[in-house]
Amino acid sequence: MEGESGAVMGDVPTQSLRMALASLIILPIIIVYPFFRRFFVRGLTAGGGK
């Protein structure tokens, strides 16, 4: 049992680091999106017509 708990505890910093990096990558996208939303909507509606 000791080996299993040690293996699980060894993965915790790696998982935390992954989550922190994912947050750092997503945060700027969330901040920038409202400013460019109208261009996204225009592009989607222009591409939607036949």
Image (cartoon, grey):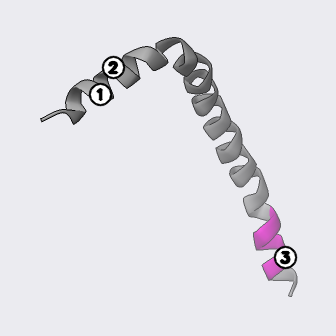
Q: Position of residue 26 (x, y in %)?
A: 59, 32
Measured in 3D between alpha carbons, the distance from the residue under mark 1 to the one under mark 3, in whole angstroms, is 53 Å
Q: How would you rate the neighbour count of disc 3 (Cα within 10 Å): few for under 14, some for 14-19, many for 20 or more? A: few
Q: How would you rate the neighbour count of disc 2 (Cα within 10 Å): few for under 14, some for 14-19, many for 20 or more? A: few
Measured in 3D between alpha carbons, the distance from the residue under mark 3 to the one under mark 2, in whole angstroms, is 53 Å
Q: Nearer the viewer, residue 7 or 38?
A: 38
6 lies left or right of 20: right
Q: Nearer the viewer, residue 28 or 10?
A: 28
Q: Which residue is mark 2?
A: 42
Q: Which residue is mark 1?
A: 45
Q: The disc labelled 2 sits on which kind of residue? A: Arg
Measured in 3D between alpha carbons, the distance from the residue under mark 1 to the one under mark 2, in whole angstroms, is 5 Å
Q: The disc labelled 1 sits on which kind of residue? A: Thr
48, above or below 5, in the image:
above
| Residue 42 in magenta stretch | no
44 lies left or right of 34: left
Quarter containing the C terminus: top left
Q: Which residue is mark 3?
A: 5
Q: Position of residue 19 (x, y in %)?
A: 69, 45
Tell me the SS state at disc 2: helix
Q: Which residues are magenta?
A: 4-9
Task: Give the residue at the far left of this rendering.
Answer: 50
Using the rendered view, name the quadrant where residue 25 is placed.
Answer: top right
Task: Give the residue at the far bottom of this rendering.
Answer: 1
Q: The disc labelled 3 sits on which kind of residue? A: Ser
Residue plotted at (38% across, 16% down): 39
Residue plotted at (70% across, 53% down): 15
Q: Nearer the viewer, residue 22 or 14?
A: 22
5 lies left or right of 40: right
Which mark is nearer the camera, 1 or 3? 1
**N-terminal of the two: label 1 or label 3?**
3
Q: Are marks 1 and 2 in contact (CB under 8 Å)?
A: yes
